[in-house]
């Protein structure tokens, strides 16, 4: 398993596609509709095998330890992501499956061993999504204090450096850092096939993006609605910064798909799920945790609420198969390497997406025939 194969997610497709958030109840749609995603293990397993057969490149989970309340206890039922990934890797052949891991909550020696275990199960198809945390409720549940914002990335740097050493150094080593003091660290086996798992991060802040540029293979960034020119500038900018560090950095984005036979039908279902039956109590709780209240943002609070209800802020792509494929072509034209997709119900909606949208992407030159 070469590093180039890992970075390509095992495919020659110009535009990589993944599924985002399926390890959580309700997925990423903050809705009360009865068909919302279950997040159950049987459904996750069926989804992974369906994606694997369709040529979808990856599955990316959300690192969540506590739900957001509301009528649905939004994302209240979640699977731990590394063991979830290991189970899915054992049941698939081509799919890359990521673990989303809070660096401050998992000891790096344990983490390094867990990642290698999953990587061997998947024969090089495990990926690591490093997160530093923002949800204070979750940290309190662990009895852990959240560090000041930029310091979180200072800790993550020591944490990731330790893991990379555990993956590569044959002799025992000590760590004498600002945060970590470890003696005679030893970790065997090493990652599968003589390379290492692909590493990604989804930071937004300058400190977070600097961390990704220094350390990661992929950066997840939101593509703002109606502002793809600005997003293209962002892609070019962070990739130029990575090259200044003698590194290459792929940029991925996230999108919420509502694809139906016609735009009218798609818009009607979107309104039914995300506006008429949103779990507004959960939405408002999430926003309040981020300091977004009606008093603080009187001019655009309702717009922010709707954006949060729609896939926790993912780019909404709503329409017929032609329109959905066309929007994905626009995203690809920004230089983005791939898109992590979510649906209200992944199992019910993915077959239609694969049958109707994937062939259109192939005709556009973005995907190879499966």
Image (cartoon, grey):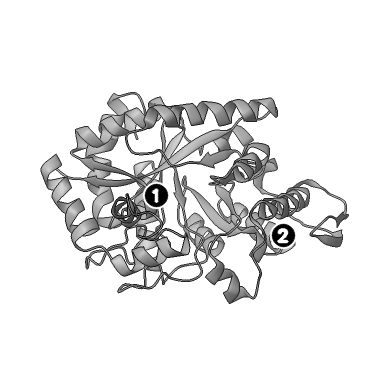
- Residue at 28% x, 49% y is 350
Q: Which quarter of the figure is the C terminus placed in? A: top left
- 113 to the left or right of 34: right
Which comes before the other along the chain, label 2 or label 1? 1
Instruction: Residue 117: give its label.
Output: none
Q: Which quarter of the figure is the N terminus placed in? A: top right
Q: Is residue 48 visible?
A: yes
- 304 to the left or right of 108: left
Give residue 262's quadrant in the image.
Answer: top left
Give residue 288's quadrant in the image.
Answer: bottom left
- For label 1, the crowd category at 10 Å Cα-Cα, with few meaning under 14, some 14 to 19 and many 20 or more, is many
Residue 340 on image: x %, y %: 41, 45
Q: Is residue 13 visible?
A: no
Give yes or no for contact between labels 2 and 1 (Cβ–Cβ under 8 Å). no
Residue 269 on image: x %, y %: 17, 53
Between residue 140 and residue 268, name the one nearer to us: 140
Q: Disc 2 designates what residue? A: 108
- 245 to the left or right of 81: right
Q: Disc 1 designates what residue? A: 19
Q: CA distance from mark 2 to mark 1?
A: 27 Å
- Residue at 66% x, 71% y is 144
- For label 2, the crowd category at 10 Å Cα-Cα, with few meaning under 14, some 14 to 19 and many 20 or more, is many
Secondary structure state at the residue bearing disc 1: strand
């Amino acid at each position: 398993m070469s590093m180039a194969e890992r970075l390509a997610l095992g495919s020659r497709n110009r535009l990589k596609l993944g599924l985002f958030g399926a390890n959580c109840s309700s997925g990423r749609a903050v809705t009360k509709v009865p068909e919302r995603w279950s997040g159950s293990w049987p459904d996750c397993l069926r989804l992974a095998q369906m994606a694997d057969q369709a040529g979808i490149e990856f599955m990316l989970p959300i690192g969540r330890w506590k739900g957001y309340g509301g009528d649905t206890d939004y994302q209240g039922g979640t699977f731990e992501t590394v063991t979830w990934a290991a189970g899915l890797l054992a049941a698939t052949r081509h799919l890359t499956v990521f673990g989303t891991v809070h660096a401050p909550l998992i000891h790096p020696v344990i983490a390094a061993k867990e990642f290698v275990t999953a990587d061997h199960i998947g024969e090089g198809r495990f990926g690591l999504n490093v997160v530093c945390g923002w949800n204070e409720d979750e940290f309190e549940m662990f009895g852990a204090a959240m560090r000041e914002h930029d310091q979180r990335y200072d800790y993550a740097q020591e944490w990731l450096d330790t893991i990379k050493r555990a993956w590569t150094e044959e002799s025992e080593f000590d760590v004498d850092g600002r945060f970590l003091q470890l003696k005679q660290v030893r970790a065997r086996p090493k990652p599968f096939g003589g390379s290492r798992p692909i590493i990604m991060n989804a930071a937004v802040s300058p400190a977070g993006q600097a961390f990704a540029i220094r350390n990661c293979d992929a950066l997840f960034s939101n593509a703002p609605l109606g502002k793809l020119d600005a997003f293209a500038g962002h892609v070019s900018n962070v990739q130029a910064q990575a090259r200044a560090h003698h590194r290459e950095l792929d940029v991925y984005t996230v999108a919420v798909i509502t694809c139906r036979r016609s735009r009218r039908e798609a818009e009607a279902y979107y309104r039914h799920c995300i506006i008429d039956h949103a779990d507004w109590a959960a939405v408002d709780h999430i926003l309040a945790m981020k300091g977004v209240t009606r008093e603080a943002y009187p001019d655009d609070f309702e717009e922010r609420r709707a954006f949060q209800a729609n896939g926790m802020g993912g780019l909404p792509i709503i329409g017929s198969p032609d329109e959905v494929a066309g929007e994905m072509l626009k995203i690809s034209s920004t230089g983005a390497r791939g898109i992590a997709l979510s649906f209200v119900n992944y199992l019910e909606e993915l077959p239609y997406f694969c049958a109707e949208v994937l062939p259109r992407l192939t005709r556009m030159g973005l995907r190879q025939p499966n």
